[in-house]
Image: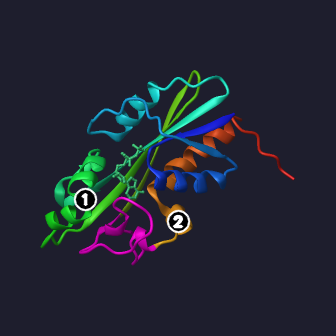
Amino acid sequence: MKFVFATHNEGKFKEASFILSEYGIKIEQKPIKGTEIQAEDIIYVVKHAAKNIRPGKDVAVIVDDAGLYIDALNGFPGAFSSYVQKTIGNKGILKLMKNEKKRSAHFDAAVALRTYDKLWVFTGRVNGTITGQERGFLGFGYDPIFIPEGESRTFAQMKLEEKCKISHRALALGRLATMVRNIGLIRQTIY
Ligand code: ITT
């Protein structure tokens, strides 16, 4: 089975490659994602995108949609994280959070696996807090303003391997990979 990871986002692809390689799954990047609708629920978004992809019998396509949910902003930007990152960006978010004492937030990831005749969705969440200013240059997107629970560094101050031990994406893809192995979509060789 060939695994294709449908995204335009290079950072996401690098993380997914690392996470899934730990489970013996190799992926190829393709900038296809079906039609992406704007909806409040990332599970719905990912399901819709994956439904519109029709892979051949020997291909499985993975679609990933993620969002940052800030409690003091009632869950904003959430499912609209992509648009908000492109428009006001991290600086805009920090401005909205200026003087805000409540800094709690979480990242959610929803990943869909689409085969010729089936569709599965898995999710992952990481809780954390929003910083006062951007910190770090690694990662992508909102990483410089998010500190995961139990850490003092932002995701952008962590190496990819460190972020990928605890991230929303690692949890969701870990669940996907476990299912893939359980149903035998790939066969592991045990020496
Ligand atoms: P594709 O739709 O092509 O996969 P995208 O960047 O639009 O790429 P999403 O809609 O899933 O992906 O992401 C929403 C926004 O959240 C986007 O601006 C990302 O940069 C950001 N984002 C997603 N995962 C993230 C992560 O692990 N760390 C920081 N920011 C992230």
The residue that mark 2 highlights is 160
Asked which secondary structure carries label 2, the reply is helix
Give the number of callouts: 2
The residue that mark 1 highlights is 89
Q: Is residue 20 above or below residue 144?
A: above
Magenta: main secondary structure equals loop
For the N terminus, which image quadrant? top right
Q: Is residue 65 left or right of residue 185?
A: left
Chain-order first, disc 1 or disc 2 = 1
Residue drawn at the location 77% of the way across and 45% of the way down? 188
Label 2 packing within 10 angstroms: few (<14), some (14-19), many (20+): some
Q: Is residue 79 above or below residue 159?
A: above
Three-letter amino acid code of the residue under disc 1: Gly
**Distance of label 1 from label 2 (alpha carbons):** 22 Å
Residue at the far left: name it.
99
Three-letter amino acid code of the residue under disc 2: Leu
Q: Find residue 80 and name its label.
A: none
Asked which secondary structure carries label 1, the reply is helix
What percent of the width, then of the height, locates residue 158?
47, 72
Is disc 1's CB within 8 Å of ligand 1?
Answer: no
Magenta residue span: 128-157
What percent of the width, then of the height, locates residue 108?
38, 51
Residue drawn at the location 44% of the way across and 34% of the way down? 33
What percent of the width, then of the height, locates residue 51?
45, 25
Seen from the viewer's position, the closer of residues 99 and 63 is 63
On whether residue 80 falls in the magenta region, the answer is: no
Q: Is residue 187 left or right of residue 29?
A: right
Q: Is residue 168 left or right of residue 174?
A: left
